[in-house]
């Protein structure tokens, strides 16, 4: 929400008036000082919206403020063009309120366009959320990372490494939405202060690693004639791409990392395929390159990769995971979700594997839900409740 500054207003004033933590207002207006602000400038107020209220006979600002249980100064602030002594029955005024949860709808077919709109909506509603585009897909779609928090500990969470696991993007976006709203009202999450999480931890989330693959699964072949022919051939002419895990070039992005890649490659497909093909070499695909570069540039302290399915979580790699911290985090993830924590699996070349090997820091792959990919939206609410604890724990552990 944007409002015009009045003479004498400050960010501290807005914080006290609207009961929004000062740190969030400051982070939503990074170029403004905390003292009096020049009148006429615009200030972003996170988590606030207005509804139009039609004046009734006998209404005054004081009466409306009392009925709506809002400060009278808030009415003045959001109705700067209204003379409170001359409001009439036919007039309408703005009533500020805290946005209800959620402001985005995650329980839907979640393609790259839905993601783009929801990112824009989240950033407009909660301007303390920042965005970095860390790379682009084969088709040129942005791979965006959302950044929330100010802490030294940097936690990376990602979704949709695989096209037919797009529900992980929706789960992650719903969580970011819930977290942002909890911050604006200073609410706890699982008895943990959201504001403490914000101050102590920086969340760096990439909701959709493989936008081309997700769109292919949900909408079928792209319009580009060459790519259309290519994916149809790989899919044996079938127009149903629901089992497609790879990117648009038929490379499985979670088999693309230099973590015993040479051991994984011989037992996988030898040419592009809807799933499991690791490519001709590690980091051949722009999406994988972007994810590797992000880990190096932003210096993640831990990685949580959301996949489906199996209700399991994997936390080790060839004995290179740091102990005991990795096991402590895995045990907490298991406790809050009911998912089974498994240290080692016979798999290599994944993003979690590479992160552990490269940085000797904790990395986790979480297999959400249970069934056949893509998991149905009917499981969304249950998966979210199971996963929510893990997402919160990833920030406080």
Image (cartoon, rainbow, N blue to C red):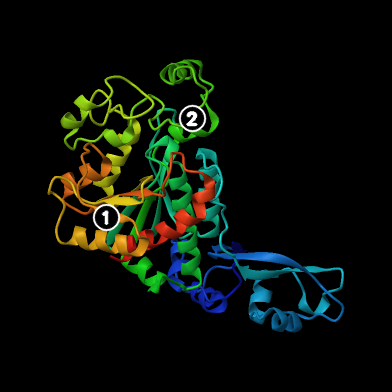
Q: Residue furthest left?
A: 319
Marks 1 and 2 in Cβ contact (< 8 Å) = no
Say what secondary structure mark 1 lies in.
Answer: strand
What x and y, as percent, mark residue 389?
38, 62
Badge 2 marks a residue whose secondary structure is helix
Q: Single out the mark in the foreground, 1 or 2.
A: 1
Where is residue 366 shown, x and y percent of the image? 33, 50
Q: Identify the image quadrant of the C terminus.
A: bottom left
**What's the residue at 18%, 38% (across, down)?**
259
Compared with residue 351, is residue 330 higher up or lower down, i.e. above or below? below
Give the x, y percent position of residue 132: 40, 47
Residue holding disc 1: 341
Q: Which residue is mark 2?
A: 216
Q: Earlier in the sequence, mark 1 or mark 2?
A: 2
Q: Nearer the viewer, residue 222 or 270?
A: 270
- Asked whether 373 or 40 is in front, the reply is 373
């Amino acid at each position: 929400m944007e409002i015009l500054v009045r003479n004498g207003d400050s960010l501290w004033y807005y914080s006290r008036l609207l009961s929004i933590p000062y740190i969030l207002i400051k982070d939503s207006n990074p170029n403004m000082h905390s003292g009096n602000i020049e009148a006429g400038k615009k200030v972003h107020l996170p988590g606030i919206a207005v509804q139009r209220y039609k004046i009734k006979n006998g209404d005054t600002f004081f009466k409306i403020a009392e009925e709506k249980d809002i400060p009278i100064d808030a009415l003045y602030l959001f109705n700067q063009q209204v003379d409170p002594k001359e409001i009439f029955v036919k007039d309408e005024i703005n009533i500020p309120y805290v946005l209800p949860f959620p402001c985005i709808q995650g329980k839907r077919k979640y393609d790259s366009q839905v993601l783009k709109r929801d990112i824009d909506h989240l950033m407009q509603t909660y301007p303390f959320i920042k965005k970095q585009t860390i790379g682009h897909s084969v088709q040129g779609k942005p791979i965006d990372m959302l950044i929330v928090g100010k802490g030294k500990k940097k936690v990376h969470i990602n979704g949709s490494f695989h096209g037919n696991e797009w529900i992980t993007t929706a789960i992650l976006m719903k969580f970011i939405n819930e977290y942002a709203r909890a911050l604006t009202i200073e609410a706890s999450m699982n008895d943990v202060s959201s504001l403490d999480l914000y101050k102590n931890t920086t969340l760096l989330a990439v909701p959709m690693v493989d936008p081309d693959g997700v769109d292919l699964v949900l909408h079928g072949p792209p319009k580009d004639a060459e790519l259309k022919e290519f994916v149809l051939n790989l899919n044996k002419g079938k127009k149903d791409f629901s089992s497609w895990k790879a990117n648009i070039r038929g490379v499985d992005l979670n088999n693309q990392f230099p973590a015993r890649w040479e051991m994984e490659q011989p037992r996988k497909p030898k040419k592009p395929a809807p799933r499991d093909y690791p490519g001709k070499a590690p980091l051949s695909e722009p999406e994988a390159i972007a994810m590797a570069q992000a880990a190096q540039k932003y210096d993640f302290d831990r990685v949580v990769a959301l996949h489906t399915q199996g209700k399991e979580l994997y936390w080790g790699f060839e004995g290179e995971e740091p102990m005991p911290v990795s096991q402590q985090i895995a045990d907490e993830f298991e406790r809050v979700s009911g998912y089974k924590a498994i240290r080692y699996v016979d798999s290599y070349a994944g993003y979690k594997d590479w992160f552990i090997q490269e940085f000797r820091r904790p990395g986790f792959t979480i297999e959400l839900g249970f069934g056949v990919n893509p998991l149905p939206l009917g499981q969304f609410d249950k998966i979210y409740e199971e996963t929510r604890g893990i997402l919160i724990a990833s920030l406080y552990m």
